[in-house]
Image: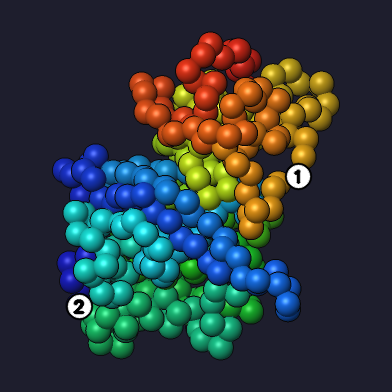
Amino acid sequence: MNTADLPDGNADDDAGAMLMQAHALTRDFTVRAGLFQPRRTLHAVNGISLALSRGDVLGIVGESGCGKSTLARLLLGLLPPSSGHITLAGTDLRQLDRKAVARRVQPVFQDPYSSLNPRRGIASIVSLPLEVHGLGDGAERRRQSIAMLERVGLPARYADHTPGQLSGGQRQRVAIARALVMRPEIVICDEPTSALDVSVQAQILNLLMDLRREFGLTYVFISHNLAVVEHIATEVAVMYLGQVVEQATTAALFRAPRHPYTQALLKSVLTPVPGLGVPDTGLGLAFPDPLNPPSGCPFHPRCAQRLPHCDSIAPVLTHGPQGSVACHLTTIAIKPEPEFTVH
């Protein structure tokens, strides 16, 4: 086996071609609040539609519990949707077996400490996808895995090290190498830098961007760190209680956020004028109970700009030249927000 035997994700001539679409995705979980409590339904993902073109870096942001990681597992085919469907290059994901999906879509998870087998050498860890798919003999798989390890910044002398002998950043490089050894087209990155030191985060982000250019990769990048998302993403979707409430190009969303929740998120980490201290985000109340979501607009209990009908009528995600937003305020004049800059 050589590189030509692997699926080739580098397809510059197809740049911009549609790779993946999610159509009205939902994912519900039945949970019990207590031993003698009735079962209740948690709407972890609630009617999300997304389109991912070749070369995109789609950032997905939102508070903990908003459904980001559940959406990632749906896009990976690790969870079936309760309703809706996903297409991969025009084919319904339900018509593809797990191996067919894995050859084209791979994950990089948050925690490099628990996502790697502690008993295996890292070359063996990286080569495992090739083994599962029956590609090459043992010697060729090892050669391919060492080559990919070197590409992500780990010299061949590390090949027989176990994960416990590596730093957190090195472990995440192993996870990235394992994801890329199959030459996938799409990589789902679920908080890939949040468990790392700040200095190491920058190295991993730069590596991901270099690999994107080299291999023609398309990323879904999930993070709670808005500064990271602004740096890496071409487009951003903002999630709240299982729904996308705003989606726009990265430049447009960070320059002029339209949904009050997006505005509050940006204010939580950004400030228009340095030296003003910690800004008032305006979020006020804590994140609502997902098992008992508010009526109408899910954000209305925390929204300082809510209208009288926000508590009874759910806004529809509407599309326009500035992006998509689910907010009743978009039908009236909205007070302009100041431009934000990253510290």
Q: Can residue 82 be seen in this view?
A: yes
Residue at coordinates 73% horizontally, 17% vertically from top-left?
273
Q: In this view, does 343 lie above or below 198?
A: above
Query: Which one is earlier in the sequence, the residue at label 1 or at label 2?
Result: 2
Q: Position of residue 221 (x, y in %)?
A: 48, 49
Residue 140 lies, with reference to residue 310, above or below; the image says: below
Up/down of 343 relative to 4, above or below: above
Q: Residues within 10 Å of mark 1 (few under 14, many from 20)?
A: few
Q: Percent position (x, y) of residue 337?
A: 61, 16
Residue 300 in percent (x, y) is at 64, 34
Give the mark count.
Answer: 2
Instruction: Judge by depth and name the residue closer to the eye, 4 or 78.
Output: 78
Quarter occupied by the N terminus: bottom left
Q: Does residue 255 appear in the picture of this structure?
A: no
Q: What residue type is disc 2 on? A: Met
Q: What residue type is labelled 1?
A: Ala
Q: Name the residue under label 1.
A: 286
Mark 1 lies on a secondary structure that is loop
| Mark whose residue sits in front, 1 or 2 | 1
| Distance from the alpha carbon under mark 1 to that under mark 2 | 55 Å
Q: How crowded is mark 2: few (under 14 residues within 10 Å), some or many (20 or more)?
A: few
Residue 58: percent from the left, percent from the top? 42, 43
* Residue in the picture at 50% in, 84% down: 121
Is residue 313 found left or right of 307 in the rendered image?
Answer: left
Figure colour scheme: rainbow
Residue beneath disc 2: 1
The C terminus sits in image quarter: top right
- Asked if 112 appears above or below 117 in the picture, the reply is above
Circle 2 — which element? loop
Name the image quarter holding residue 144.
Answer: bottom left
Q: Name the one closer to the observer, 263 or 174.
A: 263
In percent of the image, x 54 and y 77: which residue is there?
Answer: 116
